[in-house]
Image (tube, rainbow, N blue to C red):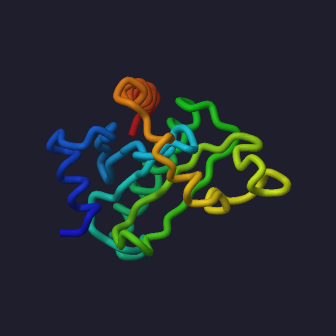
Amino acid sequence: MCDLCDTIKKSLAGENPFFVKELETGIVILGWNQHFYGYTIFICKQHATELYQLDEDYCTKYMQEMVVVAKAVSSAFKCDKMNYECLGNGDCHLHWHLFPRLKGDLGNFVTDGKGPVWWLPKDVMWNDNNIPNEQELEEMKSNLLRELNKYEI
């Protein structure tokens, strides 16, 4: 079983503290590291590595749900811009990284403060200080779930 299939299984069994909500085509989880406050992952419930491997109707629904997740993340975490990434080079299972961005959130690491999240040094982006404590995580999940529940999906 792939890591993300296992994440889905554990999330639906109530064994993933970062799990927020199950949708028709995917699950919504908060990223374990929150350097970009509100970082969320939308994992496809079907095991596929590429969008074109999904049935056309399922793919359409998955993309519609991903947009709804992005709206909810934006609203819950008050970002200026949303970055979307669907890479799959590490975990070969279709999933989207949704990074809420704020002006200047790259700090002094980039001359003009603009650029992709991956321009941050790994030791800054993935620093253990960015992991929310239990209370912070519950508050983040509650805020995101409230926003997700506003949309007819």
In the rendered view, tell whether residue 132 sits above or below residue 146: below
Residue at 36% from the left image edge and 44% from the top image edge: 29
Considering the image in quadrants, where does the N terminus appear?
Answer: bottom left
Q: Position of residue 144 (x, y in %)?
A: 44, 31
Residue at 65% from the left image edge and 44% from the top image edge: 101
Q: Position of residue 78 (x, y in %)?
A: 62, 31
Residue 106 vs residue 1: left or right?
Answer: right
Q: Position of residue 138 (x, y in %)?
A: 36, 27
Q: Total marks drawn?
A: 0
In the rendered view, tell whether residue 35 sits above or below residue 136: below
Which one is nearer the viewer's eye here, 92 or 27? 92
Residue at 29% from the left image edge and 61% from the top image edge: 4
Kindly tell me whether residue 68 is visible in this rendering. Answer: no
Kindly tell me whether residue 24 is visible in this rendering. Answer: yes
Residue at 28% from the left image edge and 38% from the top image edge: 17
The residue furthest right is: 112
